[in-house]
Image (spheres, rainbow, N blue to C red):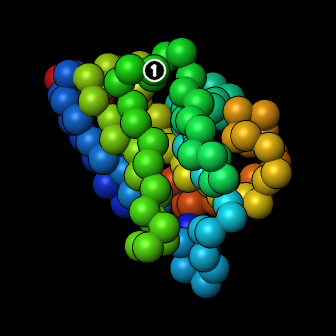
């Protein structure tokens, strides 16, 4: 089970940090990822981090503003979001899966462990 926290309402230009803690299993060996889904839109990739080489991937829309990280000792992954924009408004989901290749090679349907989602609203 993955449990998310940290969403909320923030003004444009503001920051939020999302957390996602695994319970019942360890994230050791798991690629991790963040996805989001805005109303009326399909789920889209946001960011991911591979376990073995810690390589990261970011969607063009968030590159340079968002940072994905993990603390394996705390069994937790994070998404630091800076410079938030109204178009970042969405439900954000964390995901984890044991995958052999770098995380950029995988899509949402290949992840088997998901958080419940947390709402991020960017509005003045």
Identify the residue position indicated by label 1 in the image: 63
Question: Is residue 18 shown above or below 42?
Answer: below
**Mark 1, other Cα within 10 Å: few <14 / some 14–19 / many ≥20:** few
**In the foreground, 53 or 44:** 53
Residue 76 in the image, given as x and y percentages of width and height: 45, 65
**In the foreground, 50 or 46:** 50
Q: Quadrant of residue 37?
A: top right
Q: Residue at x 33, y 35 (%)?
A: 81
**In the foreground, 7 or 96:** 96
Residue that lies at the very extreme toward the bottom in this rendered image: 24
Does residue 90 appear left or right of residue 98 in this picture?
left
Q: Which residue is drawn at 56% across and 52% down?
A: 94
Does residue 106 appear left or right of residue 9 in this picture?
right
- Assign the N terminus to one quadrant of the image: bottom right
Does residue 83 appear left or right of residue 50 in this picture?
left
Does residue 112 appear left or right of residue 62 in this picture?
right
Residue 82 in the image, given as x and y percentages of width and height: 27, 30
Question: Is residue 108 shown above or below 12?
Answer: below
Is residue 37 visible in this depiction of the protein? no
Q: Quadrant of residue 102?
A: top right
Residue 74 in the image, given as x and y percentages of width and height: 41, 73
Task: Determine whether the residue tagged by mark 1 lies in a helix, strand or loop.
Answer: loop
Question: Is residue 71 shown above or below 110?
Answer: below
Is residue 82 visible in this depiction of the protein? yes
Count how many numbered circles sit on residues in the image.
1
- Assign the C terminus to one quadrant of the image: top left
Q: Residue at x 80, y 44 (%)?
A: 101
Question: Is residue 23 shown above or below 93?
Answer: below
Residue that lies at the very extreme toward the top in this rendered image: 60
């Amino acid at each position: 089970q993955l449990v998310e926290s940290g969403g909320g309402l923030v003004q444009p230009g503001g920051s939020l940090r999302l957390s996602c803690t695994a319970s019942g299993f360890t994230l050791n060996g798991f690629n991790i990822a963040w996805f989001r889904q805005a109303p009326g839109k399909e789920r889209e990739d946001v960011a991911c981090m591979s376990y073995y080489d810690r390589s990261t991937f970011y969607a063009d829309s968030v590159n340079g503003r968002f940072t994905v990280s993990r603390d394996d000792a705390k069994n937790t992954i994070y998404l630091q979001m800076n410079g938030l924009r109204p178009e970042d408004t969405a439900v954000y989901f964390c995901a984890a899966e044991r995958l052999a290749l770098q995380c950029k090679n995988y899509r949402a349907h290949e992840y088997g462990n998901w958080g419940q989602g947390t709402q991020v609203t960017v509005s003045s």
